[in-house]
């Protein structure tokens, strides 16, 4: 194990002018995990980063290590447990999807509030996730896992109806997920999963085949503290299924829970899911499809929503999942008194727009005039340009290949829709492509 500054003299986590300073530990704070340092700092808590791999994972937005009080590169788990015990942390939490099992083990071993390791596989492996729900009597999909593409085809044929969905057992962000209309598509999708690692660089050794869920898909974000959860956001997915079987996720639309039976049904269902999977602490990001039979889980991750923008959520929701998580661990009684068992209020309409593209080539330049025009729109809160000059841009086939992410919010739906339509008109002008 290596560390940049674990000595008692140099660690700013050791002591503040008011006495010992509390410490939170974030394991692999990639992507959305970058919101944790500021969230915990607001509660007077220092943050130590644990990097679980010798090198940073290239496929993900890297952690801003300068925001942490210290960084530990873990090479020996038993030694890491002893180091973390010495910090007397308030929590050990996952900064992104693939670090959930390690964070579960570490939090359990260190003796801080934890979801425990017994059900860790069910909170990470999509097959185990669904089977755990089935054993608990919670509505779930039919499924089959195998390392043989021909066996995947045989199950799909025996299942009796197409389409079916092929996906890796453990990934995120729609990586490797394909809706298959027939046996040839199943075989090809299964081979593609086995032939490539998942987005975290881990080899796929098995394929998951599931029944297709027909209905509207939603995000349900929660934060729990001691078994009491707060629903901090429900977003409706607007998506398009391509002929290839890949889904393009277009807009996430913030649902208004006031008098909304869909939000109530989703909340009741996700409560069952959290209970079945042993989620008593921290954030969860669930994707659920409302079918004719009722809500059915697609998957759930015990980590922050990857689309989180803390300042944006503060405006349209009055809070954000990272700050709520920090409060849940550092001030659990206060959190439960204010949020336990409750659901958010939508302060104003909001949309997260992951823009699709049909551009194909190498980015020669970014048109800053077009970017500035997008950012100047009344309803645009912020816009993230994902690609730099020299990057490859290709037609969008999934969430990972969207070149812009735009956060929009406005006091009324008309202003919000007008802003969205203007962004749609401008999005292809952002990149000049060779």
Image (cartoon, helix red, strand yellow):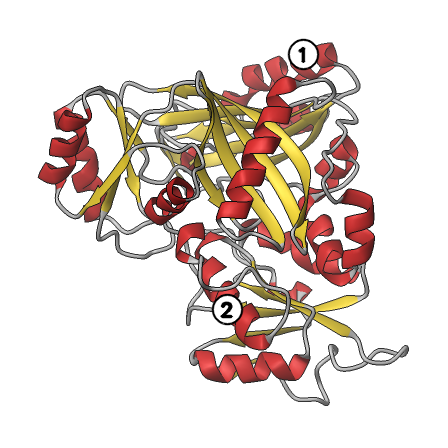
Figure check: 263 above or below 303: above
Displayed quadrant of residue 350: top right
Q: Is residue 183 left or right of residue 122?
A: left
Seen in the picture, residue 40 relative to 59 is either above or below; the reply is: below
Residue 131 visible to an observer of this rendering = yes
From this viewpoint, is residue 170 visible? no
Q: Which residue is mark 2?
A: 51
Secondary structure beneath dot 2 equals strand
Give the answer, above or below, for where 339 lies relative to 376.
Answer: below
Q: Which residue is mark 1?
A: 418
Q: Tell me if residue 280 comes above or below residue 146 in the rendering.
A: below
Label 2: how many Cα within 10 Å (few below 14, some 14–19, many 20+): many
Give the quadrant of the C terminus: top left
Q: What residue sits 62% from the left and 30% below the top?
A: 234
| Residue 224 horizontal/vertical position (percent) | 66, 50
Q: Residue lying furthest right in this view?
A: 18
* Label 1 CA crowd tier, 10 Å (few <14, some 14–19, many 20+): some
> At x 22% / y 53%, what residue is drawn?
205
Q: Earlier in the sequence, mark 1 or mark 2?
A: 2
Residue 148 numbered mark, or none: none
Are the residues tagged 1 and 2 within 8 Å (C-beta)?
no
Q: Is residue 28 left or right of residue 20?
A: left
- At a point 67% along the width and 18% down the height, the residue shown is 260
Q: Name the residue at 52% across, 56% down.
A: 62
Residue 176: give x, y in percent of width and height. Answer: 31, 39
| Residue 201, percent from left and from top | 33, 56
């Amino acid at each position: 194990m290596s560390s940049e500054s674990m000595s008692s003299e140099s660690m700013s986590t050791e002591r503040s002018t008011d006495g010992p300073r509390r410490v939170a530990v974030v394991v692999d704070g990639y992507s959305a995990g970058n919101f944790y340092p500021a969230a915990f700092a607001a509660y007077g808590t220092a943050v130590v980063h644990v990097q679980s791999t010798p090198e940073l994972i290239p496929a993900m937005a890297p952690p801003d290590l300068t925001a942490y009080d210290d960084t530990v590169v873990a090479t020996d788990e038993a030694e890491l447990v002893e180091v973390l015990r010495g910090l007397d942390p308030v929590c050990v939490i996952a900064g992104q999807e693939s670090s959930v099992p390690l964070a579960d083990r570490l939090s359990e071993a260190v003796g801080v509030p934890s979801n425990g390791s017994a059900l860790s596989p069910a909170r990470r492996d999509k097959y185990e996730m669904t089977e755990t729900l089935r054993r608990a009597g919670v509505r779930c999909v039919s499924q089959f896992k195998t390392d043989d593409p021909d066996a995947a085809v045989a199950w799909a044929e025996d299942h009796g109806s197409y389409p079916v969905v092929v996906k890796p057992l453990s990934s995120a962000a729609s990586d490797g997920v394909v809706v298959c209309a027939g046996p040839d598509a199943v075989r090809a999708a299964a081979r593609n999963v086995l032939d490539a690692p998942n987005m975290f660089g881990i080899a796929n050794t098995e394929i998951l085949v599931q029944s297709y869920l027909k209905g509207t898909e939603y995000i349900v974000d929660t934060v729990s503290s001691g078994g009491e959860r707060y629903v901090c956001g429900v977003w409706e997915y607007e998506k398009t299924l391509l002929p290839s079987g890949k889904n393009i996720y277009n807009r996430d639309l913030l649902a208004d829970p006031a008098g909304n039976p869909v939000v109530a049904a989703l909340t009741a269902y996700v409560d069952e899911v959290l209970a079945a999977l042993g989620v008593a602490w921290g954030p969860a990001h669930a994707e659920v499809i409302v079918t004719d039979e009722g809500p059915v889980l697609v998957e759930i991750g015990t980590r922050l929503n990857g689309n989180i923008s803390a300042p944006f959520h503060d405006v349209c929701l009055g809070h954000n999942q990272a700050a709520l998580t920090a409060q849940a661990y550092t001030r659990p009684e206060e959190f439960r008194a204010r949020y336990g068992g409750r659901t958010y209020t939508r302060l104003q309409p909001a949309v997260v727009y992951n823009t699709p593209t049909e551009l194909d080539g190498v980015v020669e330049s970014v048109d800053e005039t077009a970017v500035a025009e997008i950012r100047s729109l009344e309803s645009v809160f912020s816009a993230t340009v994902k690609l730099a000059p020299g990057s490859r841009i290709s037609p969008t086939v999934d969430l990972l290949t969207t070149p812009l992410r735009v956060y929009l919010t406005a006091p009324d739906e008309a202003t919000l829709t007008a802003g969205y339509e203007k962004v749609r008109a401008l999005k292809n002008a952002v990149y000049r492509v060779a």
